[in-house]
Image: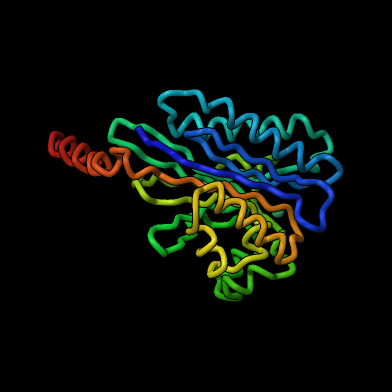
Amino acid sequence: MIRFSYGAATSPGRVRQVNEDSYLAIPPLFVVADGMGGHGAGDLASRIAVEEMTKCVALRPLFAEAVLTALEHANRQIIERDAANRMGTTATGLAGLETAGGDHLMVFNIGDSRVYRLVGHLLEQLTVDHSEVQELVLAGVITREQARTHPRRNVITRALGGDSGRIPDHWLLPAVGGDRYLVCSDGLFSELPDEVIQPLLAAGSPQQAAEALVTAACDAGGRDNVTVVVVDIDSDNDGADEATLPREALSSSWDGHA
Ligand code: MN
C-alpha cells in the first residue's frame, strides 16, 4: 500500500478576480484542473472535472480504467452543461494504483497543467503539454524557456469539454519512497523558471512547499490563477521492494508461454 503525504495551495493571483483553477488532494488521487471560458464558465468546468474525479477516490483498489473513465465522464458532463460550448478545463494529476504486480503511480494529462517529479535534486517534467507552444518546442522553432513567456502560451490543443478531451495521456511509474511530485497549473511555471521552482519544491513539508511556490508565483507577477499540489511517496512504505515484482511477474508468465 502506498502511503502519501501531501499539501496544496491555490490563489487567484494578483490580476484575475476569479480563481478558475480547482484541485483534488485526497489519497490516492491528486488532480489540478485549470478551467477556461470566463463569465463563470471556467470555474464551473474545472469544478465538474474535480467532482467527477472525486467519485473514484473511494475505490479500493483504485485502477487505471476507473480514473480514465472518470475523465471521460467529466468530459461528457462539461459538454452537457455547456450548450454554448464555451467552457473547458485541463485535468492533470497523479493516482496511486495498487496493481497485482505492486504499487504504481499513474500520471495523466489533458491540457497544459503539469506533473513534475523531484528525485534528489533532479526536477523532471513528466507530462507533455497539449499546447501550441509545445508543438513549436518539439519542432525546434523555440526553446522550452522561450515557450514559458511566449504570447501564445495560453493556446491549448486538448481539453476536457470537447472531442479533443476524450483521450488523456497517461503513464505508469513505480511508486518509489522518497520521491516528491508536483502537480500544478500554468500559473506556476509561466511565472517561475525550473531553477526557481526546484529549491522551493525541495524545501520543507509538502504543505510548506505548496504555499511557498504559490507565494513565489504571485510575487513574480501572479498574472494567472496558480494552483500547486505537492505529494510525497513516504519512504516507509514497502513499494520500493514491490516495485521489482512486475518485472518478475512479467518474465515468469512470459516463460510460461514460451
Ligand atoms: Mn491557467
Which residue corresponds to the image point at 18% horizontal and 41% vertical from the top-left?
251
- Residue 156 percent location from the top left of the image: 68, 55
Q: Residue at x 38, y 43 (%)?
A: 234
Q: Which image quarter holds the C terminus?
A: top left
The reply to whether residue 149 is in sight is yes
Q: Nearer the viewer, residue 26 or 20?
A: 26
Q: Residue at 53% of width from left, 70% of height from top?
A: 195
Residue 114 vertical position relative to residue 60 in the rendered view, above or below:
below
Q: Is residue 230 above or below residue 134?
A: above
* Residue closest to the eye, 30 or 250: 30
The quadrant in which the N terminus is found is: top left
Q: Is residue 216 above or below residue 234?
A: below
Tell me: 172 left or right of 216. Answer: left
The quarter of the picture where residue 55 lies is top right
Left or right: 44, with 97 as reference point: right
**Residue positioned 64% across, 47% down in the render:** 9
Spot occupied by residue 147 in the image (x, y as percentages of width and height): 63, 69
Given residues 238 and 157, the one toward you in this image is: 238
Residue 161 position by quadrant: top right
Q: Position of residue 131 (x, y in %)?
A: 64, 59
The quadrant where residue 233 appears? top left
Provide residue 215's location: percent of width, then percent of height: 67, 57
| Count of numbered marks | 0
